[in-house]
Amino acid sequence: MKSTTGRRIAMRKPSEADGAAMWKLARDSGVLELNSAYAYLMCGKFFADTCVIAEAEGEAVGFVTAFRPPARPDTVFVWQIAVSQSQRGQGIGSRMIRELLKRDACRNTRYLEATVSPSNAASAALFRKAAEELKTGCEVRECFPARLFPGSVHEPEWTFCIGPIPTKR
């Protein structure tokens, strides 16, 4: 797929070498909570099977970090998803989710979950669209109330639970 800038977008698994680029995309997103650079390095090294890099001409323009919760092997939890400002509005977020669900590591996924803060309208729309594309439901419920977050003011986080996902997709 080519972007509106004419650059071909490729999807692949990350490596630890992508950690800095993922950190920068999260920092520049304007809405994601920035994790330590170490967390993104760990995702690239130890969770590559459930993470995605969107790349244009060797440059990371998007990422998904995700994992399978150990107590729920039928679920993939999307920790973060980001697309560079220059590439937004082109369906790259949706493509990364589809790529994630096609992976062998996600073959038996029945539920896709993510937490989204109330001010992150783009992510809320993305996950609702994913449910629509997968022809399934999207249940939204409170996950982490604001009072659980220490330090500065933090919005609550709402769980978006998409599923059950059809086994043939």
Image (tube, helix red, strand yellow):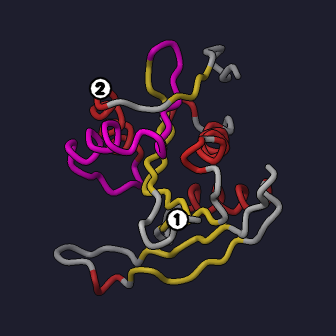
Which image quarter: residue 99? top right
Say whether residue 134 is magenta: no
In screen coordinates, is 19 left or right of 141? Answer: left
In screen coordinates, is 61 left or right of 36? Answer: right
What is the count of numbered marks? 2
As measured in the structure, the alpha-carbon distance from the residue carrying label 2 to the one carrying label 1 is 28 Å
Numbered tag placed on residue 17 in the rendering: 2
**Residue drawn at point x = 39 percent, y = 80 percent:** 144
Residue tagged 1: 73
Whether residue 89 appears in this view of the structure is no
Whether residue 70 appears in this view of the structure is yes
Residue 74 in picture, x, y percent from top left: 59, 65
Label 2 neighbourhood size at 10 Å, few (<14), some (14-19), many (20+)? few
Amino acid at the residue labelled 1: Pro
**Residue drawn at point x = 58 percent, y = 55 percent:** 122
**Residue drawn at point x = 68 percent, y = 39 percent:** 91
Numbered tag placed on residue 153 in the rendering: none
Circle 2: element type: helix
Question: From this viewpoint, which residue is outermost toward the left?
Answer: 151
Residue 30 in picture, x, y percent from top left: 39, 49
Instruction: Give above or below for 154 relative to 64.
Output: below
Question: What is the magenta range?
Answer: 30-58
